[in-house]
Image (cartoon, grey):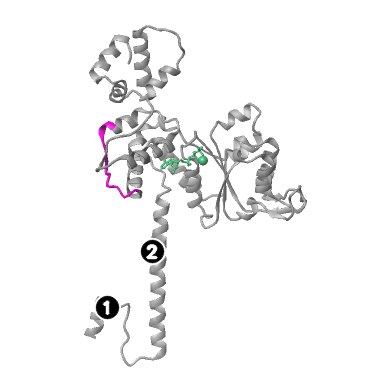
Amino acid sequence: MGSAVEAMKTGAYDYIEKPFEPEEFQMVFNRATEHARLLKEVKLLRQRQNECDAGEIIGSSASIRKLQSTIQRIAGFDTTVLITGETGTGKELVARAIHRMSKRKDGIFMAVNCAALPESILESELFGHEKGAFTGATNQKKGILETASGGTLFLDEINSTTPNFQAKLLRALEEGTIIRVGGTKPVKIDIRVIAASNINLLEEVRAGRFRADLYYRLNVVNLEIPPLRKRKEDIPLLAHYFLNRFSKKYHKEIKTISHGVMEKLLQYNWPGNVRELENTIERAVLMQSGNELTGVELPDALVTDIEDSDDQIVSIAEMEEALIRRALQRFQGRRDLAASALGISTATLWRKMKLYGIG
Ligand SMILES: Nc1ncnc2c1ncn2[C@@H]1O[C@H](COP(=O)(O)OP(=O)(O)OP(=O)(O)O)[C@@H](O)[C@H]1O
Ligand SMILES: [Mg+2]
């Protein structure tokens, strides 16, 4: 018995006492192989979990936390979802997260950019076509709505589709069937549609550019992702998240972000949103040596803003007042950030605010 304990301690999976029956040996052997299989599976799941972490929605702002909790609540239901947000705010990231948290997670996640394809191609890609449906349709072809059955279809830039296409999509969603281009027979489909738009779709409806019926069908759940400039408190978290990711990727040891760089990141208004931040950090990591990120390249936001404004001549004082108001507005009243954006001390900012009667 002593040697059995010893064997287990050194990593043996099990032991059999002699003499043993063949069935007994078979049983232990089966258990051992099952054990090995489970270990492998755990490893695979851990790996998949890590990959999932790469799709994590980072952010601590109220809007992102609300988004995270809404996703949790709705992911499990098979409703259509409409995601709106400027370019680079994370619409696809959110769509993937919903898919991963849904019952369809083992099915396909298919992303189609509606703006990238002309209507006829988009239609035959999605709905498929029968043989001879149009010149070049030499074979019957199943569309994505059929082939991605059991999965999720992400329709990006849905706003750029035509009314004709919108009507077909609506019918497919309402009836759960499609008719292939050139066909007559309805085919059952089982797909969850998540649509995204980088412009306000309701305005498109009001302007008559988007079908109201499809809008209401898609809008069962509407997730709005605010631009990064409206949730600047997410910048430090995101910046560190990307720093870690790219440090790892490029085998660097950069662990921290210098105060100066962080200030620059907070000052900038990120027209390209999180994607722009991600690319900025990636570039900075590549250029950096040592263990702190001390440099970052960004367009000068304030200067561009002045150049963009109308070319009326105003007094320096007026200009100064306008700049201060704008900076305070941009940083939601945070004087420390506004002052550093303006290149003045908080004391000076305070004094000038009193002078112009701001605040
Ligand atoms: N909250 C977030 N946390 C972590 N990464 C994010 C977040 N938001 C966006 N990203 C990253 O930013 C990049 C752009 O996101 P995504 O492609 O989802 O944006 P999008 O809204 O679909 O943009 P577009 O309108 O240009 O298609 C991706 O690499 C994504 O992983
Ligand atoms: Mg996208």
Q: Specify whether residue 57 is in view.
A: yes
Q: Mark 1: few, some, or many residues within 10 Å (few <14, many ≥20)?
A: few
* Three-letter amino acid code at the position of disc 1: Met
Which residue is depicted at the point 40% across and 56% down? 49
For discs 1 and 2, the disc positioned in front in the rendered view: 2
The label on residue 182 is none
The stretch drawn in magenta includes residue 108: no
Q: Position of residue 78 (x, y in %)?
A: 56, 49
Q: Is residue 303 above or below residue 141?
A: above
Left or right position of 115 against 185:
left
Magenta stretch: dominant SS?
A: loop
Q: Secondary structure at mark 1?
A: helix
* Percent of width and height locating residue 154: 56, 45
Left or right: 115 as drawn, with respect to 62: right
Outermost residue on the left side: it is 2
Count the numbered circles shown. 2
The quadrant of the picture occupied by the C terminus is top left
Seen at 25% across and 13% down, the residue is 351
Circle 2 sits in a helix, a strand or a loop, which is it? helix
Amino acid type at mark 2:
Lys
Q: Which residue is mark 2?
A: 43
Q: Say if residue 101 shows up in the picture.
A: no
**Residue drawn at (31%, 50%) of the image:** 251
Magenta extent: 250-260
Q: Quadrant of residue 320?
A: top left
What is the C-alpha distance between the residues marked 1 and 2? 22 Å
Does label 2 point to a residue whose CB lies under 8 Å from ligand 1? Answer: no
Q: Quadrant of the N terminus?
A: bottom left
Tell me the residue that label 1 is attached to: 8
Location of residue 285 by image quarter = top left
Q: Quadrant of residue 335?
A: top left
Residue 226 lies, with reference to residue 31, above or below; the image says: above
